[in-house]
Image (tube, grey):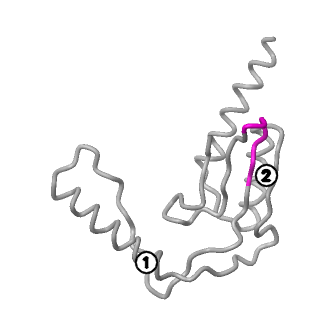
Amino acid sequence: MSYCRWSDQHFECDIYAFADVRGTFEVWVAGQRHVSDVPKPRVPVFPVEGTEQQIDEWIEQSGKFEDWIDNATLVPIGLPHDGEQYSLATPRDAAEKMLELRAVGYNVPQYAIDALLEEAQKEEANDRSD
């Protein structure tokens, strides 16, 4: 299961976090970010029950974003943990590592931390009931 990927938030996420088949929680840190002199276009949320016009607008904006990514340059992030990978024993350990990484300047989405902490609480509650 993936908690966040580098492509999340329109390629603004610096973390790829997932549960590994070995039972560990992996937190991988990007080494590069996309940059451009051209402002990054925002892609709206896909209109699930949208009108044809809304869907067409979403397709157009998505195309602009894809063009931006294709023409952007990858540059080193320049923070101390660029390219590092962490294999952690529990979801709480993974959440804490992601908080540490955010504190030094990496883009880490709150929803990923929240999902890991929620999973940790469930595991800890199960451990107490055993």
Quadrant housing the C terminus: top right
- Can you tell which quarter of the image residue 28 is in? bottom right
Q: CA distance from mark 2 to mark 1?
A: 31 Å
Q: Earlier in the sequence, mark 2 or mark 1?
A: 1
| Drawn side of residue 11 relative to residue 127, left or right | left
Q: Residue furthest bottom?
A: 37
Q: Is residue 110 above or below residue 82?
A: above
> Which residue position holds label 2?
97
Quadrant housing the N terminus: top right
Q: Residue furthest top?
A: 130
- Can you tell which quarter of the image residue 74 is in? bottom right
Q: Amino acid at mark 1?
A: Trp
Question: Would you say residue 16 sits in the magenta stretch?
Answer: no
Q: Residue at x 76, y 67 (%)?
A: 83
Mark 2, mark 1: which one is toward the viewer?
A: 1
| Mark linked to residue 68 | 1
Q: Are marks 2 and 1 in contact (CB under 8 Å)?
A: no
Q: Residue at x 82, y 44 (%)?
A: 88
Q: Residue at x 58, y 47 (%)?
A: 111
| Drawn side of residue 55 relative to residue 75, left or right | left
Residue range (magenta): 21-27
